[in-house]
Amino acid sequence: MKLSLVSMIATCVLLHMFYTRADDDEATIEVEQESDAVAESIPYSTPKPIGNVYLAEHFDDPGAFEKRWIISQAKKDDAEEAIAKYSGKWSVEEAEKNGLVGDLGLVLKSKAHHHAISSRLDKAFLFDNKPFILQYEVRFQHGQECGGAYLKLLSHTKGLDLKRFHDKTPYSIMFGPDKCGTDEKLHFIFRHKNPKNGSFEEKHWKRTSSIPKFDDIFKDKKPHIFTLKITPDNSFEVLIDKKSIQKGSLLEDFSPPVNPPAEIDDPEDSKPEDWDEHAPRQIPDPSAIKPEGWLDDEPEFIPDPDAEKPTDWDDEMDGEWEAPLISNSKCTIGCGKWKPPMIDNPNYKGKWKPSMINNPNYKGKWKPRKIPNPEYFEDLNPYKISTIEAVGFELWSMSDGIVFDNIIISDDPLVVDQWTEDTWALKKEIVDRETENVLVRLVKYTNKHPWLWAVYVLVIGLPVVLFISFCCTTTPTSKVNFLNNILSILFVSKKCYRFL
Ligand SMILES: *[C@@H]1O[C@H](CO)[C@@H](O)[C@H](O)[C@H]1NC(C)=O
């Protein structure tokens, strides 16, 4: 009880100090100033690609943006009239928080609207014989409930009209994140041209494993970069924030597969009338005869005639207890019905069963016969995706404030790496310093106000001490007393807190 009194007084004093000190907002002002200082201490200038690019869009020049990017005036094909228009607003702005000074991005502005905006590349990208690298940055400033943030790479087609960009506009590749509720996706779709009849079919990337912490990108409000690399050997790689998510092959990792099966089920074939799918694979051998002298009724185990009752037998071990009993002083050796242990029966044969033979009537599951697939083709070079002429966002979103930035298409990995260093890497530094700062600031602040250490010790230590003390008191009476003491401490603390 003495100990409880001491800790009670200590809590009271510390609470008093905590509440009086917490009033000064010196701390919050410090935090905001530091955050601005971090952004200002990382100088940013509009990036310039160091080599060949097909597009390198940083959105920093609003004048150039207006000329180059076209907001769609089309209507979405299969939507209800009220929401059929691409009426979502776009703007070019700095990030709301922790952005680089002077760095603008393309921002999706309207909740629950269709948005469509697109821009021609500087020059078309032909999938002839060079690597294709696409990278862009997404930041969900307000998180994401339900909506996409993927990019469409629009195909070169006769009379491609960006003012009429809509959901059916042919694209070569669609790539990027998408989410609705708990369904989070990273799309990578390419449209493959059927070499037999020239029609296009969407091929969807089959992810082989889940992406660690993928849901974070939708809620952490930090900038993330998505990278897609496709090489002329038909391999591809997907990266998020420079980390490889999957390497794979256009020929193997897509659904439906690029190449159809060589054989298909014969549609003409049908299951014969007398086909019994349920006949068992094996049946008892009808020609088997039970050997003479087979003993069906002989038990498998018999008592060992040579065994003797052990001298220290104790029937209590059988557990056949019913009413409270006292130990029978007569049972020094053993009580109850004694049974000798079991041994294998030398005469055991078990129930007779005829041996098994293959069932002459067995057919199994019926399968139609195979014929060559009339639509078969083999395209060994799906890398040759349709030429890309423009990029566009065609999105529905329930959350606004999505920033897109630093879209680059190149055939040179070094160009993309440098672009990343000049853009996303700087933003990441701000974000990293921010996170680091929370802890560093806490320690700094505590060092300035050392009494806080006592609060930490008390807040963490007291419950532990109380718990241990409670567990170590043995009798129920002392446990009750202990609880009474705790309750009275709480009661007094409350009074003390009110008094303050
Ligand atoms: C081309 O072939 C594919 C697959 O064989 C088929 O699904 C599609 O309907 C065909 N398209 C045309 C235009 O014939």
Image (spheres, grey):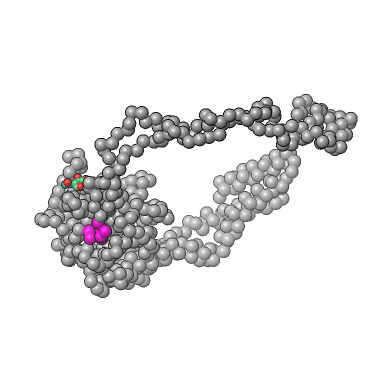
- Name the residue: 36% across, 64% down: 242
- Name the residue: 29% across, 49% down: 261
64 is within the stretch colored magenta:
no
Residue 325 visible in this rendered orientation of the protein: yes
Residue 58 visible in this rendered orientation of the protein: no
Q: Examine the rendered structure and indicate whether residue 38 appears above or below residue 485.
A: below
- Name the residue: 39% across, 53% down: 208
Q: Position of residue 474 (x, y in %)?
A: 74, 43
**Left or right: 489 in relation to 110:** right
Q: Position of residue 95 (x, y in %)?
A: 30, 60
Residue situated in front as seen by the camera: 105 or 194: 194
Q: Give the main secondary structure, helix, strand or loop, of the magenta stretch.
A: loop
Q: Position of residue 78 (x, y in %)?
A: 19, 41
Q: Position of residue 121 (x, y in %)?
A: 18, 63
Residue situated in front as seen by the camera: 489 or 328: 328
How many numbered marks have been drawn onto this rendered protein structure?
A: 0
- Name the residue: 30% across, 51% down: 257
**Left or right: 329 in relation to 64:** right
What span is in magenta? 379-385
Name of the residue lying farthest toward the right: 330
Quadrant of the image occupied by residue 276: top left
